[in-house]
Amino acid sequence: MKIAIVIVHYHTPRLLAPAVDALRRDAEASGLELEGVVVDNGSRPEDRALMEALPFRRLSCGDNLGYAGGANLGLRATSAELAVVMNPDVEVLTGCLSALVEALCAGTAVAAPRFYWDAERRFQLPPTERIGYSAELGRLMAERNQTWCRVMRRRWRRHNRRFFTADKNLVSYDLSGALLALRRDAWQQVGPLDEGYRLYFEETDWLQRMKRAGRRCRFVAAAEAVHLYAQSTVHEGRAEQWFEDSQRRFRRRFYGAAFSRALEGLAVRLRRGSKLSPELSSPETALDSDRLPATASWLEVAADAKGFPAAVRRLDASDHPLAWSQALPQEIRQRMAPGGYFLRTVAGDGRELTLNHLEIPHHPPRETASRLGSR
């Protein structure tokens, strides 16, 4: 069986070879034939030799079409009935493609794997946040209010732990766009990804259109991949503006202009208030000596004081006693953008136990990601 692979690239050429190697190993183990293309949304002349050496065809855009534009271009340039659209910072693990193909052949329109942050598969990455009027309002209120923060974190855990603990496929439209497997007939029926999104929200928009069209989308529990996320945006100064523009476009399309304007007005008023300043359970200097509490079942890593986790580690008996300084492996620390992060431990029943702060210092940009071993 042939499957098209569309990798949308933007100034991360050295991530491509490990990503392609992982795809080829998995395809060979699964008996799949790959029809691969790399859509080049941005690269330097000296980087293109690396791309031309790959066994995938390079498609030059001539300009940055955005993720949606690159994905659509790659899908139009391929012919296989099943396809994968992905970032170059994703490396599939053995069995990922076959599990996704199995779901697609069973009638699933769009399928996504379980994502890990590290090669040892200790930290899982969440799917996209749930959408809806109450979710939008709650997240906005959490910007300045500790009570709302706690409420929204509880809601976050109820939503995401379904995925973290799943041992079978879940019907879901909250799938990460880092890698999406799809049926071409679904893409043709619903239409291409909306190229009006420069970056962010394009997959959320498209998956909601799938839902409205009655096409099933699924999280495939047996499909696994490592996502070295934000590698192309961490040094992109326009990423924050692109996010805001895309968020505004999505809100107006799915909630209407009146609700969107009300949210934007409330956001302006909330920004005038005081910022969140969470109480840390121990000073930052204690990170090297304190250990995670023995009653902790989860370790959550968040990039801001609101505490909505960017990654989660499920703890078991073998993890105790675990020092705070060992909670994040060096592999992950080296890829994290400089700045402050919050590490929170949570009991199995959802009680928040301890909160610590971790500062990632500025370091020279890493041009390569460590090669992940085959599984």
Image (cartoon, helix red, strand yellow):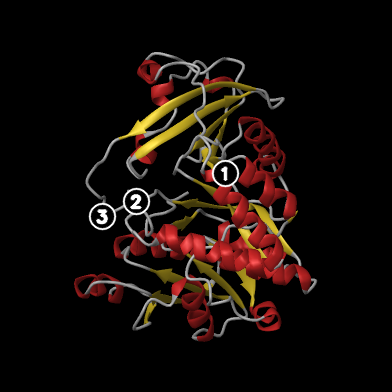
Please indicate whether residue 53 sits to the left or right of residue 124 in the image: left
Label 3's element? loop
Residue at (67% x, 57% y) in the render: 262
Residue position for label 3: 367
Residue at (48% x, 66% y) in the render: 199
Label 2's element? loop
Please indicate whether residue 154 sits to the left or right of residue 119 in the image: right
CA separation, marks 2 and 1?
Answer: 44 Å
Asked if residue 36 is positioned above or below residue 162 in the image, the reply reads below
Label 1's element? helix
Farthest residue toward the left? 46
Foreground mark, 2 or 1, reads 1
Marks 2 and 1 close (CB-CB < 8 Å): no
Residue 270 marker: 1
CA separation, marks 3 and 2?
Answer: 12 Å
**Which of the 4 image quadrants contains residue 32?**
bottom right
Residue at (69% x, 27% y) in the render: 350
Residue 292 at x, y percent in the picture: 51, 18
Instruction: Indicate which disc, 1 or 3, sits on the residue closer to the N terminus.
Output: 1
Marks 3 and 2 close (CB-CB < 8 Å): no
Residue 119 at x, y percent in the picture: 44, 44
**Front residue (pair 44, 255):** 255
The answer to whether residue 237 is seen in the rendering is yes
